[in-house]
Image (tube, rainbow, N blue to C red):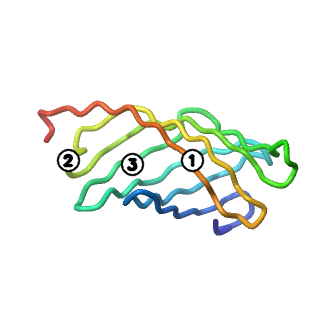
Amino acid sequence: MTEVRPGVLDAELEARGARIAMRLVFSDEATFEEYGTIDLGNGDALRFRSLESGHLERSPDGRSRHGTSVLGVVEGEGRYAGASGRITSNFVVSPDGEVTDEQVAVLFIDREER
């Protein structure tokens, strides 16, 4: 994660062939709004934004931080053109800033927009 300015972080993650670029805007130490893009390669992508404030708190081990967010898909490209839906994210930030994120997505694709 890279601090853009106080309370604003940019992050890039890679996993399972996808690249995720996101911006987190914190309103305090524990709540944030998020938006960004999931690039799935070959011109396929999803753009998302927070549906409600995400939450970040200390994990029981006292070293890591655990976060959750609910995201809305606002636009898709390529085979995801016309996509809408939701993405839930559960993640852990290690003391050295490494992010481990598990996301679950439910997507609907309007075939007429393809």
Determine which of the numbered discs, if any, sits on residue 34 in the image: 1
Label 1 vs label 2: CA separation? 24 Å
Q: Residue at x 84, y 42 (%)?
A: 60
Q: Is residue 6 above or below residue 46?
A: below
Badge 1 crowding class, 10 Å Cα cut-off, few under 14, some 14 to 19, many 20 or more, is: many
Counting residues from the start of the chain, the first of labels 1 and 2 encountered is 1
Between residue 55 and residue 91, name the one nearer to us. 91
- Give the image location of residue 41, x and y in percent: 29, 61
Q: Secondary structure at mark 2?
A: helix
Badge 2 crowding class, 10 Å Cα cut-off, few under 14, some 14 to 19, many 20 or more, is: some
**Disc 1 residue type?**
Glu
Is 114 left or right of 71, judged from the image as shown?
Answer: left
Label 3 vs label 1: CA separation? 11 Å
Q: Residue at x 28, y 38 (%)?
A: 83
Circle 3 residue:
47
Circle 2 residue:
79
Q: Is residue 84 above or below residue 44?
A: above
Counting residues from the start of the chain, the first of labels 3 and 2 encountered is 3
**Disc 2 residue type?**
Arg
Q: Residue at x 15, y 38 (%)?
A: 113
